[in-house]
Image (cartoon, coloured by chain):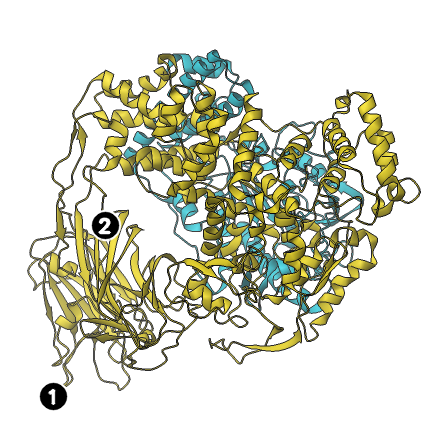
Chain colours: A yellow, B cyan
Amino acid sequence: MTVVFLYFPMSKACSTLSLLALITSVVFHAAAEKLNSSKRDQAILHFEKYCFDCHDEDVQKGNVNMAKWFDAGSFDGTLMFENLITAKMPPENKKQPNAEEKRAMLDWLAKRQAEHKPAPYRRISRHEFVHSLNDLLGIKLDLTGEIPDDRGTFDFDSDRRIKLTKEMLGSYFKVADRMLEFALPSEGFAPERIWVTNKIKDSHKTYNIYTRPYKEGILFSWTRANNGNSYSFFYDNFDPPVPGWYELTFDAMKMGSFPEDVSMEIFAGKYYYADDRPQAQRLLDVISLGNREMKSQKVTVFLRPGENVSVHCYSKHNFRQRNGKQGAYIKQLKARGPILEQWPPASYAKVFGNLPIKAPFREAREASPLQTNLQAIGAKVTVSSFQKGMEKEKMLDGSNRTFWHTRFKPTLAKPPHYVIIENPQAKEIEGLNYATWSGGNGNGQVEAYAIHFSDNGKDWGKPILTGPLEIRLANEQLILFPEKTTKRFIKLLITDAHTLDGRSLASIGKLDVITTLSMDDAIAKVTVSSRSTDDTKQVIKRFAERAFSSSLGIEELAPFYQASLDALEEGEDFVEAAKIGLKAVLCSHRFLMAPGEHENQSYARAASLARTFWLSVPDQESLKISSSDELTIKDIPAQVDRMIKEPRSKRMIHSFCNQWLDLRSFDKIAPSLKLYPLYNDLLNHFLPLETEAYLDYLIRENLPVGRLIDSDFSFLNQRLAQHYGIPGIYGQNMRKVSFKPDVPRGGLLTMGSVLKVTADGFDTSPILRGAWISKNIAGNTLSPPPEEVEVIEPEHGKDAATLREQIEEHKKSQACYACHKSIDPYGFALESFDATGQWREQYRVKKLHRATFVYRPKGYFDLVGKVDPSGEITKEKFSDVFGLKKILLSDHKKIAYNFVKKFFDYANGYKPNLKERLDLFTMIPEEPEQCRMKDLITKTLVYSMESQSE
Amino acid sequence: MNAISRKDFLKAGAALPLALQSLDLRAAAKPKPASPPKRIIFICSCLGFYEPYFFPKKRGDLKTSGYLRDMKTLDKMTVFNNLYHPGMDTSNHDSEKSFLTGSPSPESPTFVNGMSLDQVLAREMGKDTRFPFLNFSIYDRGWGISWNDQGSSIPPMHDESKIFEKLFEKEDLQAKKRQLKNDQNILDCLQRDMVQLRKKGSQPGKLDSYKAAIRELETQLTHEKFWLNTEKPKVENSLSEDPEFAFSTKISNLFELAKLAFRTDSTRVITLSMDWIDGAITVPGTTGGWHTLSHHGGKAEKIESLSKIEIDTLKHFNRFLFEMDQIKEGEGTLLDHTTVVMGSNFGNASNHTCNNLPVIVAGGGYRHQAHTVLEKPTPLCNLYLELLHKHNLDAGGFGSSVADMGLLKG
């Protein structure tokens, strides 16, 4: 039991208390002391010889009285063990046990301690559930967000202390349904459609400055480095009809003769009008425009109905000029989808194998050019009067940039002002969609209306509905009728309109009817031509064997057979009946609990490896080897090699970075725009990708573990290079970049992702960053913090030195210093980096701004106080982060030991006990260059599996 | 339902599905109770309240509490001094986990939480409503203050529009029926599978935890099936949208939903966890990190900012109580039939200490004492035990309780 859950993600700016919430009560079974007493005596003699000088009854340094513990017999030896194995104790200047003695001491500590036994199984995580279903069904659908996060405050998703609950099971039922439906839809597949558009929806009148019509499309010529309010620009005329994958092709080029690429961020989000609210959007992808000629740029993205596609463009330049000529010219967007990689979709072959699959022709066609519902229902519109140049067509074109206006020249049209809609096909109309026009001074905007219906266009009767309309905003306003109507004539009577000059005027930017258009889409339903019970059984068996990673006998399959066969008997369609059995498989005990029940050890190993590297089930190849029980311990290294090479292993990298390095908290905090005005969502997108690419490379290339601390390369693109001050990197594709020796980057500690996640977006705290290194990289084991200590919060006030002085207070108190000497110094070295990970020599202190905050690229701050990144750790002095890295690198075994402990925890769902730690430590090579990442991972897994086989 | 699985299910000693129990009650033609049903809500503000502003300066006089003096329902409130959870000495934010369970040492690696009070109450009080209980929180971290009988978190709902939809929006009943039938088929299959696995000699412990989840899900399905025949209450959507004060709006809406749920008798047990969020929040008068500010370290400026957040929270609480008290029900008001417990897992969040927890009990028809100062530190679980008794649950103890001290009169 080392570091207990340091609840780091939640305790970002939190106290030293929670960061140090360490070893507490461990349940000991005193009976475990049935040891060879001579070995015990011998070990104790060593302890007396090497430790009692400081830790006996008389001295009790650091409040540690080992003599007393040994007498009592029952104590937690974890801290002693960790200090001894990582050579923290005895201190360097004291006499040291030789290897044999040390081994005897560690052995005894490991054996005497009967640790709390982890549960022999765990529930699979929601990530594993979703990835597995995708692989089993041959689809790509991320529904992880639909399942609650049940990790709680544990470090790793795999933690065995997490129990399966009804709520989780319930959401697995739901998600299994949805994923099966996505793979094998009972309603069939919507046809593929193509939309072409070069129009941007007008979302705020002040946004016009960012874009302008240019040639056949739009030039994004005014942007800014940071968009605290995502000023994105939504494409009109494309609404994804069903959830699915869509291919977006932008015909675009870079304008301007600067060397940097222009980046187009592609978002999905709900469009709404006239609002400065940050619009909740998902970043789908980034297109890097370096091309000065028109080129088609493709991205494939997942979209849901109700989401619109929007773009935003960036370069390092602020194109602050009206009618600018620089930027990104986007001629058009072509959207195609929902796309399927093959027809019939791969999911059918995955599930039904060689059974005859019937798939009708699935058509692809251009989307209807009709833009408005009025056009679609063949409506005719008449108006009371119109001004030349502001005809009714300007109100009916679906855009509120143009408008209809009653006549005011040469003569003023008299009221009543109205619009009459004729509904010749008697379609069901639910109401009207109204918008004011997005310019103007408000003159003529409708303030109140009445709705009348008529069968003949003459007799109107009493109003059906009256009401007011907002004139302030040019957003869309819905006028909903009390109930749907099929009346031939609908009149919108304007009963009051805004007037600045007393004249009776009326204008409308956009008017349309609200109706449900029947989709005449040819749905393509895929069927399997079989009703045979044998076929059903075969389908269930194949699927269950893959899901359970085992060969299965009739008895084991019987419950699942029955589920499908019952349905088949009741007359269900073959595919639908099969889906019931498949869902049962996916919600079953065997699938949801790991390890499952496997026919042989090979299957068990295959399942475990697939879970570790792919967060999924084994592939056909592993299953094939396992079926003849030929995946032996000896074969694991080759399997690890094979699995790491697969793109699916990126899931492991992502998941491990999230959990080990805390990157899952990366998005929780947005850096202050006042202090860090150049930080933007593009950078936010790429920072974690650097870390993942780097770790992936270290593992694939099997590089020495020291590269975690330092190296002369990383994976960067234009935006990251700008952030780090590395010149000459253009384009947003990530690539390996070598650093000159004076660059402080290289290694995890100096990555922006890590530096950001260890700060609170405003200030940096050496304690937080120090604790992060101590826990995640150095693997220090710390004693619990003293109770009720004052918490030091980072505050670079007018006198920035105070923070360091405050922290230096730790030195004065033995109780504090015992731990903080293993925390604070790391953090001091990283003071050279601000809360976004940029290099700094001085601190930034926020300045007040007048009235409302207005963004400006130089921010609002003063520079105060010089950064002092020097410190001392384990009696070794360093002057900056370069020095710190050297000190950390000097003990590669410690870095490797921490890494294997974390990986063990990630893969197995519990922290290794002392015995296991001793074994893991023993596997670490003495030579730094021989101590390699993939080897360490492989050894850890081989070790875990060997002990599981025992 | 499959015969074997049904028998197996009953033999396993499962509790009867909630709705079946209600059916039985109904079958006995029990007359409708004359008095309105009792309800209860627990609210935990996980970063505490700044003590000098929260607790009355003058013993017994709520008018001397900076935060509470302007509350409109002061005569229906009792503020307690000196309640605590034993065993939280070195605890940090994990103390949140124990707010409604009283389980000690939540930061220990071997910690297993207990069942939370609301869940114990929901077993009885949840039988006759569409939702046996509701649990809310302000974001999606997956845990709040409700914990099941295995000590696992019951993931709270946090999205107001989804909660509203669940409570009040019409469903496609045909689709729901099909879905329930499908789920029931799956459950039957899984029951058969477990019988088969047990025969095969699967690890017993492993089966048990899974079985418990299956059993509870089955109970839930039966309950849902029963309620399919009753239409959801029709309620006007009164949730507010104010993007400027998103945090404040969220809390206000969750209180509003709690009120609506009680008013329509959709549930009788609710928890609301105000768990803290990273990054800055904006409430009228201040912007800052709630958590950062809670570590005020005694600095006046930070306390000022922090108090703005706490005042805002209590403003919504005040409105909740007031509006509940405006709704007439039976002889009294909805508030009179609803016990409202507002508190925190922290006494002093700045130091992460857990003694003298701020606790308010409001409503519930008690003869309120305004301010009850306990002479000695007293387990909060004593009050919890009393609440069980007040709601007709015959429990010998709850969590760290020592005794029902009769703190609530009447």
Query: Residue A189's x, y, as percent?
Result: 20, 40
First in sequence, mark 1 or 2: give its number. Answer: 2
> Looking at the picture, does residue A480 appear above or below residue A609?
below
Dot 1 surroundings within 10 Å: few (below 14), some, or many (20 or more)?
few
Residue lying at the far right in this picture: please name it: A58
Dot 2 amino acid type:
Pro
Spatial CA span between label 1 and label 2:
47 Å
Query: Residue B232's x, y, as percent?
Result: 38, 40
| B387 relative to A278 in the view: left or right | right
Question: Helix, strand, or loop for circle 1?
Answer: loop
Question: Helix, strand, or loop for circle 2?
Answer: loop
Query: Residue B357's x, y, as percent?
Result: 71, 48
Mark 2 belongs to which subunit?
A
Q: How many marks?
A: 2
Location of mark 1 (residue): A410
| A263 relative to A653 in the view: left or right | left
Could you confirm whether marks 1 and 2 are on the same chain? yes
Quadrant the N terminus of chain A occupies: top right
Viewer-nearest of discs 1 and 2 = 2
Q: Is residue B410 visible?
A: yes
Pointer 1 with pointer 2, Cβ within 8 A: no
> Looking at the picture, does residue B294 appear above or below residue A319?
above
| B304 relative to A361 in the view: left or right | right
> Residue at coordinates 36% horizontally, 35% vertically from top-left?
A133
Q: Nearer the viewer, residue A810 or B51?
A: A810
Quadrant the C terminus of chain A occupies: top right
Q: Which mark is residue A241?
A: 2
Dot 1 amino acid type:
Pro
